[in-house]
Image: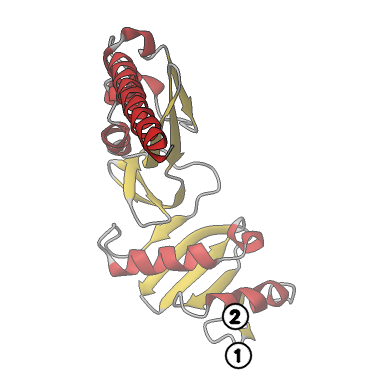
Amino acid sequence: MRSGTRRFGVGGLRRFRLWAVLAVALVTALAGLAWFSPVLSVREVRIEGAGAIPEDRIRELLQIPDQGSILRLDTAAMAQRVASIPKVRSARVQRVLPSTVRVRIEPRTPVLYYDTPEGAHLLDADGIEYAVEPAPIGVPKLLTGRPGTADPLTRSAIGVVRVLPPELAVQVDTVRADSVSDVSLTLRDGRTVLWGSSEDGERKSAVVLPLLTRPGTVFDVSSPSLVTVK
């Protein structure tokens, strides 16, 4: 009886191994078919969040082949190429089986601009200068000696803009940076806010709005523990 059981076990093990080999071979064949077959070629490109960025330029940089499986696409390389567009802050490319490529774009948004004879230079919240074109309505103008991405005063001004409460940010017309610790805001109604450096932004934001309800033209929150109005 024990001998028969052992023979049955050995036979069952052989059958199991045979089926396992067949299953692996089938999966390999199907994978190879999917990898090379035009059945899974790209039929749709879905671009989300491009905004003013031309979709034709995005499609050009994707470099999607006319034929070949969607599984063979290098989505990381595609995203990197799309992110090389100056107005793109980040890009993500995904396969959506069986035949769609989805591209999600995060565009750069201007927080400041400065003027030159060539036009308005747009700066985003990362301090990246990414376009020379008319500034959108509501974007404050930067006033400083040598504005630009590498300029410490420009970075200080951007640091201040990033921490402004939204209720104040929409009122700002110009941002002036005379030093990294001397940044001031001119509001659209002509009033001035002396902000100082970008440090203590949370405390300054907490006191500036109540302060602006008082009569005056110059509001100093550079030292949030000792604010003044003139």
Kind of element beneath mark 1: loop
Q: Please name the residue that numbered disc 2 is placed on.
A: 203
Give the residue type at disc 1. Answer: Ser
Which residue is more in the foreground, 116 or 166? 166
Residue 217 in view: no
Q: Position of residue 83 (x, y in %)?
A: 32, 38
Q: Position of residue 101 (x, y in %)?
A: 41, 23
Q: State how far apart marks 1 and 2 are (Cα).
A: 8 Å
The picture quadrant where one finds residue 1 is top left
Q: Residues within 10 Å of mark 1 (few under 14, many from 20)?
A: few
Q: Position of residue 53 (x, y in %)?
A: 41, 30
Residue 71 vertical position relative to residue 124 in the rendered view, above or below:
above
Quarter of the image with the C terminus is bottom right
Q: Are marks 1 and 2 in contact (CB under 8 Å)?
A: yes
Kind of element beneath mark 2: helix
Residue 195 vertical position relative to residue 187 in the rendered view, above or below:
below
Q: Please name the residue that numbered disc 1 is placed on.
A: 225
Q: Is residue 202 left or right of residue 57?
A: right
The picture quadrant where one finds residue 94 is top left
Which residue is more in the foreground, 150 or 64? 64
Q: Who's the residue at 49% across and 54% down the image?
A: 140
Which mark is drawn over residue 185? none
